[in-house]
Image (cartoon, coloured by chain):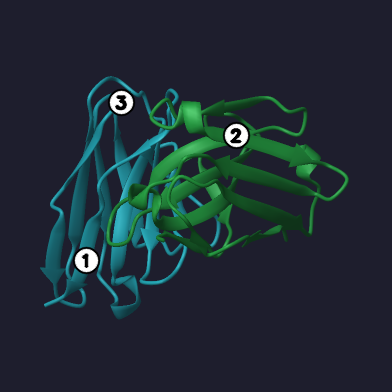
């Protein structure tokens, strides 16, 4: 199985801050990497697929980059509504696997 | 717009079988791949398995011997059965639609989730 390691596991930031999360895969997954946002008590929602493609309707302050084994997710200017847990997910091979999550809250 | 809704018992006894159904509305189950994903309380996400309307399936090896996923195209539903459950199977169970009609894919539509507790 491909293991996905996210860092940090949690972070605190102020409104307007640039927030960066990394996701590392145990083997080359090309660009087959997604990012999800999950708010408490809710199902995850897809933000980015193919490492850097923003899903339609997702604010442009969200972005993703990377390929191979190392990926980055960025919130360009943190908004109060962005408080959530963020997960990466690889879809290069089965079983599909998720990172452990990064909890983002307000400082 | 496709919507998903999980249904089934919220409490299952240890050693018994967990059964959940996902109803697809606003679209046909024959156009995409569909998965089950679970999330233990306070923990991360685990993919359980997928199904296509033809009956083609695959499951996570960590659960393979206990998992069965089936589809009912007439009812626009797909279902999950997990046998011999233990407390470790306590989780929110989500059904989800694959974004681009591929096995290896992202999940663009999710159900609201069904909390299942394993307890006597």
Q: CA distance from mark 3 to mark 1?
A: 25 Å
In the picture, one chain is cyan; tell me its letter.
Answer: A
| Residue A89, position as x, y percentages in the image | 37, 40
Give the mark toward the camera: 2 or 3.
2
The residue to which callout 2 is attached is B68
Residue at image location 27% in from the left, 61% down from the top: B42
Q: How many marks?
A: 3
Residue at image location 55% in from the left, 46% down from the top: B17
The residue to which callout 1 is attached is A104
Residue B56 or residue B103, whichever sits in front:
B56
- Image colour assigned to chain B: green
Residue at image location 76% in from the left, 34% down from the top: B53
**Considering the image in quadrants, where does the C terminus of chain A appear?**
bottom left
The crowding category of the residue bearing disc 1, from other C-alpha atoms within 10 Å (few below 14, some 14 to 19, many at least 20), is many
Q: CA distance from mark 1 to mark 2?
A: 36 Å
Residue B74 or residue A60, whichever sits in front:
B74
Specify the label residue A2 is tagged with: 3
């Amino acid at each position: 199985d491909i293991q996905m390691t996210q860092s940090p596991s949690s972070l605190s930031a102020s409104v307007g801050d640039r927030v960066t999360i990394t996701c590392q895969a145990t083997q080359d997954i090309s660009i087959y990497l997604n990012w999800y946002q999950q708010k408490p008590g809710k199902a995850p929602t897809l933000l980015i697929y193919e490492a850097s493609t923003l899903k339609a309707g997702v604010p442009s302050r969200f972005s993703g980059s990377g390929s191979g084994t190392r990926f980055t997710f960025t919130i360009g200017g943190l908004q109060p509504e962005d408080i959530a847990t963020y997960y990466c997910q690889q879809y290069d091979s089965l079983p599909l696997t998720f990172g452990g999550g990064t909890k983002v809250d307000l400082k | 717009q496709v919507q998903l809704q999980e249904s089934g018992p919220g409490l299952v006894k240890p050693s018994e079988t967990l059964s959940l159904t996902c109803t697809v509305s606003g679209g046909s189950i024959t156009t995409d791949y569909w998965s089950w994903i679970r999330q233990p309380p306070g923990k991360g996400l685990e993919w359980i398995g997928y199904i296509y309307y033809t009956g083609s399936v695959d499951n996570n090896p960590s659960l393979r011997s206990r998992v069965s996923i089936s589809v009912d195209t007439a009812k626009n539903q797909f279902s999950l059965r997990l046998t011999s459950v233990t407390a470790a199977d306590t989780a929110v169970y989500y059904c989800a639609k694959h974004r681009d009609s591929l096995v290896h894919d992202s999940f663009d539509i999710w159900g609201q989730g069904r909390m299942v507790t394993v307890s006597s």
